[in-house]
Image (spheres, rainbow, N blue to C red):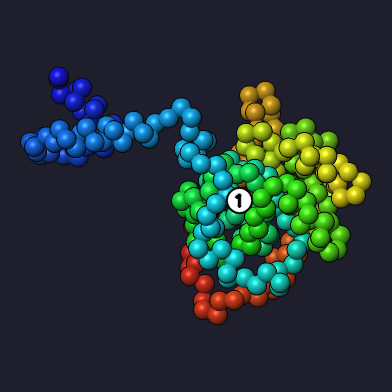
Amino acid sequence: MDSTCLKSILKATNLYFRSRASLFRPFNLAQLKYNLHLTSHRISPFCSLNGEDEISKEGTLPRGTGEAVNEASRPKILQVVLVSPQIPGNTGAIARTCAASAVGLHLVGPMAFKVDSNKLKRTGLDYWPYVVVKIHDSWADFRDYFTQQEGEKRLLAFTKKGTKVHSDFSYRKGDYLLFGSEKGGLPAEALQECNSEAYGGGTIRIPIVETYVRCLNLSVSVGIALYEASRQLNYEQLQTPVTSTDTEESFITEDIFG
C-alpha cells in the first residue's frame, strides 16, 4: 500500500496526521478498524435531510428560549409560521430574524429535526432568549390555536404560485406569514385556509428569475417578507417597549453578522 492510499484511508477515519512528525507515530490497527466501523454507520442512503435518523419534535427548545421577554407585553402585530421545516439551520436563522424584529415564531409539525438539534441552537446563536417560539404538533393543532386568538387576524401564504407580489400586497396588524417546507412548500390544507373567506388573506410570491433559480432560501424569503410587512406597518412592533424579565444588562455587546 503506497503512502497516498494510506493518507486517504486515515483522513476518512479522522486519523489523518497534522504534521510530518506524526508520520513516525505507531500505527494503531485496532483504532483504524474501530473508526471504519463508526464511519460505516454514519453514512446511510436513508438519512433525513439533516443527517438524523429520527424525524420528530421531541426534545426541548434551546435553553432560555423566550425567557428574556415578557410575552404578554409583546404586541402581536406580525407572526411567522413555519409549516414542516426541514433544515434546522434555516429555522435557527429565522428565529434570529424574529428576535431582531420582535415577532413571534410558530413551528408546525411534523418537522425533519428535533427541536433540540445542535444546528438549530448554533444558527440562533445567543438570541434564543429574545424570541417567543410556539410549537404545534400539526396543522390542525395550529389552526385550533389560531382560531382561538382574539382580534383581527389573517393567514397569508407565501408560495411560488402566489397571486400577488409581496411588495404590492397591503399588510395589516394580526397577519400570520406562512411558509412551507424547503422540500415541498405549504400543504394543501394550509393553502386552502389562506384562500378561505373566514381567515384567508390570499397567496403571495416573492419574484425571482426562475430561468435558473428554483427558489430562494427559506430564511431569506422570511426576511424579505417580514421586513416588507414591518416597513408598511412603520415598524410598530419595534417601537413598542417590550418588558424584559431579565434585569441585568444584555449579554449581547457587539454586532455579530456570522
**Is any atom of residue 226 visible in this view?**
no
Nearest the viewer among 148 and 77 is 148
Q: Residue furthest bottom?
A: 247
Nearest the viewer among 248 and 112 is 112
Nearest the viewer among 199 and 32 is 32
**Is any atom of residue 114 visible in this view?**
yes
Percent across and percent down for residue 110 are 63, 44
The amino acid beneath tag 1 is Ile
Percent across and percent down for residue 158 are 75, 41
Could you tell whether 170 is left or right of 240 in the image? right
Could you tell whether 177 is left or right of 118 in the image? right
Q: Residue at x 51, y 41 (%)?
A: 54
Kindly state the secondary structure of the residue where label 1 is placed: helix
Give the position of the N terminus as an image quadrant: top left
Q: Residue at x 16, y 39 (%)?
A: 19
Can you identify the residue that label 1 sits on? 94
Could you tell whether 125 is left or right of 74 in the image? left
